[in-house]
Image: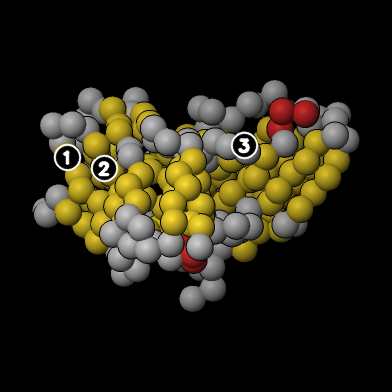
Amino acid sequence: EAGVAQSPRYKIIEKRQSVAFWCNPISGHATLYWYQQILGQGPKLLIQFQNNGVVDDSQLPKDRFSAERLKGVDSTLKIQPAKLEDSAVYLCASSNPTANRNSPLHFGNGTRLTVT
Amino acid sequence: AQSVTQLDSQVPVFEEAPVELRCNYSSSVSVYLFWYVQYPNQGLQLLLKYLSGSTLVESINGFEAEFNKSQTSFHLRKPSVHISDTAEYFCAVRKAAGNKLTFGGGTRVLVKP
């Protein structure tokens, strides 16, 4: 089975610019997550989708971050405008709890963002 | 809310020596526990998990972890490491009734020849 696909792998932007990341989860996985992993720290959940609905976005900085999953498959995460402290790896993950309540999360390779 | 503490940020170890990575969690409800591994420039991969049953769980590449409810710990061990075990290891916790993972800060393992 194909894994979680993310693009781009790397992105360098200047502060105050905008950036968008894309994620294609494993086929059939209803749940999609975006995590932020700052260097030297563990991943922190930004937003969780169940199909095209938001389940948890309590840690998403909504003044600058937005995410959507319009058709319940692919998702995009946007930052506008970016700040220096947004430099991190952005990880997308998916799971299929409807098939298996204890379905593990499958992670993509991430997008490394550097804000200068 | 649950939280995870990984006490060691880095663990250097010689090849074929044993290693233990410590993980403690806090939660007011029943939880499931996980260890993920992240090789350089890759995403996280599930190494092993504790859901219920035997408190000692094993992975296919020789790692094991023991769930200790009284000490709220889930330490990861391997009796003899290989160079290829060089990676960052993350402990994570999830409420038994939910599917949101909370991660610890990670432990970087550097295996030296």
Q: CA distance from mark 3 to mark 2?
A: 24 Å
Amino acid bearing label 2: Phe
Residue B40 spot, x, y in % from top left: 60, 57
- Distance between the alpha carbons at the discs numbered 2 and 1: 6 Å
Tell me the SS state at disc 2. Answer: strand
Question: Can residue B79 be spotted in the picture?
Answer: yes
The C terminus of chain A - image quarter: top right
- Contact check, label 2 and label 1, Cβ < 8 Å: yes
Residue matched to label 3: A38
Horizontal side of residue B44 vs B67, given as left or right: right
Q: Which residue is mark 2?
A: B74
Three-letter code for the amino acid on which mark 1 is drawn: Asn
Which residue bears the numbered disc 1?
Answer: B68
Chain containing the residue with disc 1: B
Q: Nearer the viewer, mark 1 or mark 3?
A: 1
**CA gap, disc 1 and disc 3:** 29 Å
Q: Give percent across and percent down for residue A91.
A: 59, 49
Image vertical order of residue A76 relative to residue A62, above or below? below
